[in-house]
Image (cartoon, rainbow, N blue to C red):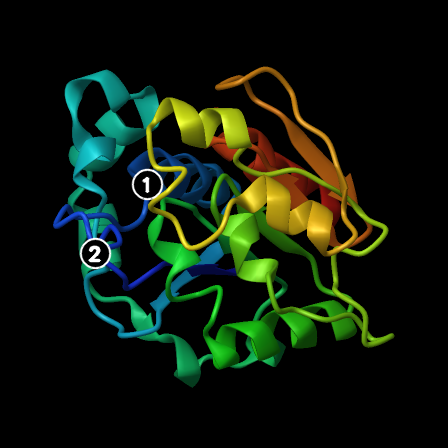
Amino acid sequence: MKILMVLTSHDQLGDTGKKTGFWLEEFAAPYFAFKEVGAQLTLASPKGGQPPLDPKSDEPDAQTEATDRFNKDPAAKSALASTALLNSVRVEDYDAVFYPGGHGPLWDLAEDTFSIALIEAFIKAGKPVAAVCHAPGVLHHVKGADGQPLVNGKRVTGFTNSEEEAVQLTNVVPFLVEDMLKEKGGIYSKGDDWASYVLTDGLLITGQNPASSEAAAEALLTKLR
């Protein structure tokens, strides 16, 4: 079982002067879930190398069992520090792709033509695509075989407007994930704010927030089995 994990390379939180990137829990929980079943993982990002970590995701109140495990795992840290260039990966080498969130993907991966084409190719090849929290934003410009938005008519979730409001970034992000998924024709639904909520519709798996990370990874593994 070979799984590609795609992380953001974007580290600027709009024009706030603050840093962003990927959210640690959303990488760590799936990473270890995949590792524990013996999956071969490849980590990639648009710029390659060390992807930027959202500093807030490494603060004490954001720590989880998975983040603690990551911080004590030299092999995991080494793998993360040397991500492959995204434009060097090939769909035929993998069984599935997983996108961790954090605000970064809204700026780079959502607009990245290679990422867009990659997701379209995974779906066309009958291979599952999973994205959690803000990462469903990477589906913004992705189309299905019918030329319609990939999420059109599909049951999807992602970071809610109310969760974005709670972190006071509604007017900072380039778009709101919930609004975008609805505008693209997605059948959007959500659970309680900050609670785990994951949906699977065909080959597409989406998770609402950081708490949904492990469940989204397990849903991807279930699909692969």
Compared to residue 152, the image places residue 208 above or below, namely: above
In the figure, 47 relative to 36: above or below? below
Residue 156 shown left or right of residue 161 in the figure: right
Location of residue 177 in the rendering, given as x and y in whole percent from the top left corner = 55, 45
Secondary structure state at the residue bearing disc 1: loop
Res 126 seen here: yes
Q: Nearer the viewer, residue 175 or 211?
A: 175
Q: Within 10 Å of the Cα at label 2, are there few (<14), some (14-19), or many (20+) other Cα atoms?
A: some
The dot on residue 23 is 1
Compared to 69, does 81 lie above or below? below
Residue at the disc numbered 2 = 12
**What amino acid does circle 2 point to?**
Gln
Residue 154, position in %: x, y?
A: 81, 48
Question: Relative to the observer, which residue lies in front, 123 or 107?
Answer: 107
Taking the spot 51% from the left edge, 73% from the top edge, the residue there is 115
Query: What amino acid type should be assigned to the residue bearing mark 1?
Result: Trp
Hey, which quadrant is residue 74 in on the image? top left
Q: Whole-Å distance between the Cαs marked 1 and 2?
A: 14 Å
* Label 2 element class: loop
Which residue sits furthest front? 171
Instruction: Look at 25% across and 48% down and name the residue there.
Output: 76
* Residue at position x 21%, y 69% in the image: 49
